[in-house]
Image (tube, helix red, strand yellow):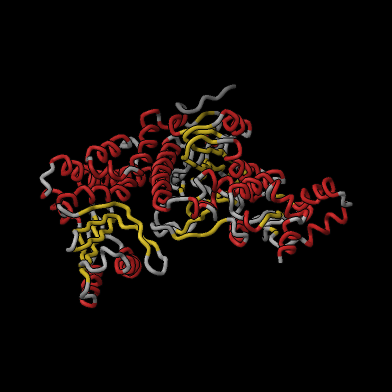
Amino acid sequence: MTSQVTIMNDSPIADILKREGPMLSSDLSKLLEQRYGLNPTAARKRVERGCDGVNKLSQIVFPHRARFVYLEQSYGSQHFFHNLMEALKKTRSAYYLALRALELRDNVMPRAHFLIACGAPIAQKKHISAESLLERLIKAALVKEVDLPGGQISVMRCDREQMSDIPSMWGKMKSRLIAEKVTLLAVKDWARNLGMVSYESVETREDEGRDTLPKVGTFNWDLAGPSYLHPMRTYSSTVLKPGFFVCDIALNGWISPDDIGAFLHKCTTLRSLPKVGKCLQVFVAEAYQTEAFALLKGEGVIPATTESLFGHDVAVALKNLCNVLNDTAKLTESPAALDKIFNDLSRIEGASYSLRGSLFEFAVAQICRSTFAGYDQEMNRIVKDPMGKQAEIDVLAVRKNHEVIFIECKGIHPASTLDDDEVIKWLDKRIPILRGAAKSHSDWAALTQRYELWTSGRFSEKALALVSARQEKSSKLVIQLRDAEYVLDEAKASKEAGLLKTYEQHFVKHPMQEFEAEKRRQKRREDRAVKRRIAVPIAPPPLTPLHTLGEIVVGDSVSTELQGELRIVP
């Protein structure tokens, strides 16, 4: 037994992999030739046969049918991924571009966003599609799809789950996505106001009610729209063809040349498509390394930053937004912090609307400090049920030996009604997971459980009936809906002037002002559409018949009625 283990450990292949780390099979063959004197054919066959404890990465094949070889115990280590990325980079693999795009976003991002950022097309001859690329990465066990607490399916590098604190990772991704959403709205508004895109046709990945992502050519983009500016448009016969404005975004620190490889691949491939018009391409980041900035400029791409687009104050506000959203304690303790976020970003049209939904839970947490005085409170607590399913508790309030309250927050316009599907999802998906987590929790299992859904809008009659029916079936727990009127009353009951002022200003008054402003904008859009409409010309009056020369000249004299109108030149 001992001799067998010794023989396995002394295998030339295993010995090289222990010393050098994972590598391509072609490189491994060369090392066998150099260090053990094998001829090329024998070395290649030795690698093909392999040995115990040595694996080859599935799904991903390198040029000349080379495979990535590694020791079983090294899989998923930092050394494994470092060597894999170097091998992919050396062979200019599409998988390298995709994994670098994922790495730029801390190795976790929403699945839909990955399909945009990975650099692969939706479908194109001689190119691997984005969906196929993701499928192969999953089968190779390099990435996995995870259902994070927010209910959004995300793509995560496989080693990330073991290395990271999930709540911290989720909080950082959520704050980055909010900042990117606000920035995309600002870029959309900026491009429309400058007339760079067709006003009503520009789309972003954040648009509500969309079933598909923005698309130009064979690629998806974070933002895209047709442009009819003179340098962008072309004519095919007599048909006017627009150009396009496309933009991708990553707000996560400094951008290196390798970080933008996937984006540049999209840009150069798009330009090679003969049936796609001219494109103005923009990448938005917080900052660029000098080499990355020069690379984008050299490729004819605009390397935009939040500061160059919106000025220093807004750029700092967007950066602070990420930091503050990660520090939930600071935001819940100070109404002024919430107020400052709204005010700093007020110059971006639609920013308040986007932030309201995300920041409503912080306002609720502030209100709950008085509503549930004496309770231990926590925000964004992530729990698991016995089956391993995760859920995020927006606001948790626990009174020792009495009750535990799970509060779900839905910030919407005060004049609107919360979608019934949100209520159904809360009843059928969220509450069962929280129930399972509470039953297995040593401190919560014996307490009365209360589940509340707070919104800054209204509930439909159907939603009220659904909750009432569920409550009748579930006598062991309390299920309640809290609408905008209740939330405002609780804010008033807190007796905190700063909290009430902030809540009324940003969750009651400003939303209604925005509603009226949106109505005015819609009216202006309709007026512009009317002006642009081609008017039908009115039929001209019938022409008066011209007199012939015979009618004009009578004998040798000119008709007296035309003498003043006609001068005859002899």
Looking at this view, name the residue that lies furthest to the top: 570
Of residues 225 and 270, which is closer to you in this image?
270
Q: Position of residue 5 (x, y in %)?
A: 71, 62
Of residues 12 and 189, which is closer to you in this image?
12
Q: Position of residue 82 (x, y in %)?
A: 62, 45
The quadrant of the image that shows the C terminus is: top right
Whether residue 258 is visible, yes or no, is: yes
- Give the residue at x 15% y 50%: 370
Drawn side of residue 112 relative to residue 22, left or right: left
- Give the residue at x 23% y 37%: 336
Position of 7 relative to 224 (above/below): below
Drawn side of residue 87 relative to residue 122, left or right: right
Of residues 327 and 555, which is closer to you in this image?
327
Whether residue 234 is visible, yes or no, is: no
The quadrant of the image that shows the N terminus is: bottom right
Looking at this view, name the residue that lies furthest to the bottom: 473
- Give the residue at x 53% y 32%: 288
Drawn side of residue 474 relative to residue 276, left or right: left
